[in-house]
Amino acid sequence: MGLFDAVKRALGLGAPADKASGNASPPTPAATQGAPGTALPQVPGWDGPASADPERAAAVTELMGCVTHSAFGLQAYEAASFVNALDELIAADAIEDSIAILRRAALVLPDHKDLRLRLARLYMRRYDNESARRLWEGFTADDGLAAEANFRLAEIAEREGRHADAASHYQRALAYDFGYPNAQQRAQSLRSHLPAPRKAAAATVGGVEGTASVGLEAPEGYDLKHPLGRGGYGTVYLAADVVLRRDVAIKFLHPHLTRDERRVAAFFDEARLVARLQNPGIVRIYDLAVEQRVIVMEYMTRGTLRDRLSAGRALTPVAAFGVATRLLATLSQLHDAGIVHRDLKPSNILFRSDGSVVVGDFGVATLESGSAGRAAGTVLYMAPEQKRGDAVVDRRADLYAVGLLLAEMLAGGLPVGSGSRVLEPDAFLAMLPAAARDVAEPVLRGLLAVEPGARTASADEALPRVRAARRQLQSAEIVPDLMAELARFSEATGVALPDLESR
Ligand SMILES: Nc1ncnc2c1ncn2[C@@H]1O[C@H](COP(=O)(O)OP(=O)(O)OP(=O)(O)O)[C@@H](O)[C@H]1O
Ligand SMILES: [Mg+2]
């Protein structure tokens, strides 16, 4: 398994062939106690892994060892593996353990931005507002991170009911990055909490300015706030759940699409099936109001992948492969359960407040109107067999869409030419940033094969390739930073590092 492999690689510190310089002490779990002569800081209160799964717990212990050890010369290759292993731990939701490791890492490498950023995001997930705030406040002076830092500080203020502070942090986030996903909407929705022009809560959208003519009625127990967007199948509103006092997103299916009772029934059946799987990579469905053709779901505070791409914020290659990894991991479970999405595209990929990637709108494609082709939505992301109207459209159509999404995230634009035709592989590979092209090529060729029979056959087959590609790119990205950090550490403490340059 990936996590364990990465840990083993991280522990390659002592591998004989690599230790010509002989400066590093051999890594054993005992190294967690630190090397002779140097008092290494321990994380206060850490008394072993919280993870119950034995393999994960072992990985946590090893990673703890790596952190201590890193002070003595965590080398380039191992450093990247360490971060990869840690990210897998985070992705596996081992929040407490990841926090413990990162706190120790922060003691050893206090200035390492990437690690502190991970810690700040984890504190958000744990609702440890106080610890998160301290870290985010430190990031507000960093131009590259000020938008996110202010957005997070606003979220914390909202959690604590300090609406005026929240509004001012949203404004600051917007000042740094006007397109910051959802900052505008959040700032706007906060206005209703602020003392000045106070609006009475409306039971239906009829009371909300500009939407009366639509005549949408909120299901009981929800107050509509404002529209979030409109798609081919419905209109989505931000709403408040009055009982639980939380924000939700409510989708009203378009009436003209919902006349076919059988399709509507199939759609709601699939929604129930998807909800039962409880996959964290899928937008949570809270409620279905079948009569009113309404779906109440989790509100994704950080918007969609489309928002992110259209704000001209192309993802780094590592982030692009990270999103593809999450998508494939989710699809793997869904496909095993016999569910095919068939409408994967940037507006259906959303981000939770903690930045995690989730897929929305499962089952919406069942509302398509048969032989007349698709009633709604875009054809751009459809697999060739879907466009042709083949009788069999299976999981491989979703894999094709993941290929297109990955290409788009990497290139900052969709690899299509005139007439919405997807470019030939050679042409779109040429659009990719040089640093990512070689790594991405085999992955993209596999996912974007025109004939389903020639395509990468399953999410499980694609996953290891995408993970390996991400790892390769991450090493290239993160190593120079870590090396500089270690050199500073060495200078400050006099602890000798092994000869890093020769590796
Ligand atoms: N759960 C959600 N949380 C936050 N915003 C959402 C949520 N679901 C949808 N949205 C927003 O509402 C917009 C409209 O969503 P909708 O699903 O109706 O259309 P679409 O995704 O653009 O196209 P399609 O109808 O083909 O899915 C989205 O683009 C997104 O910005
Ligand atoms: Mg959608």
Image (cartoon, rainbow, N blue to C red):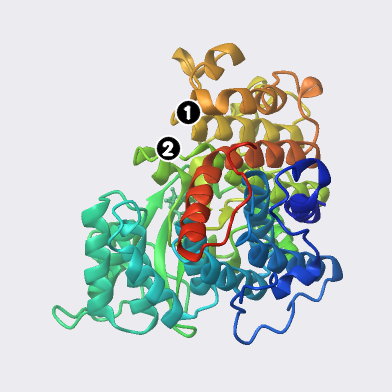
Q: Given the current orientation, which residue lies at the most extreme left position?
A: 196
**Mark identifier at residue 335:** none
> What amino acid is at disc 1?
Ala
Asked where in the image residue 188 lies, by quadrant, the reply is bottom left
Labels 1 and 2 touching (C-beta < 8 A): yes
Identify the secondary structure beneath mark 1.
Answer: helix
**Mark identifier at residue 411:** 1
Q: Position of residue 251 (x, y in %)?
A: 48, 58
Q: How many marks?
A: 2
Q: Position of residue 403 (x, y in %)?
A: 63, 31
Quadrant location of the C terminus?
A: top right
Q: Tag 2 or tag 1, which sits nearer the N-term?
A: 2
Residue at x-position 73% and y-position 53%: 10
Above or below for 469 versus 118:
above
Residue 173 or residue 188, whichever sits in front: 173
> What amino acid is at disc 2?
Ala
Above or below for 320 versus 412:
below
Identify the secondary structure beneath mark 2.
Answer: loop
Residue 95 or residue 60, whichever sits in front: 60
Residue at x-position 74% and y-position 59%: 25
Asked where in the image residue 463 lies, by quadrant, the reply is top right
- Cα gap from disc 1 to disc 2, whole angstroms: 7 Å
* Residue 412 in sight here: yes
Instruction: Identify the residue under disc 2.
Output: 314
Residue at x-position 58% and y-position 59%: 283
Q: Residues within 10 Å of mark 2 (few under 14, many from 20)?
A: some
Q: Position of residue 444 (x, y in %)?
A: 65, 26
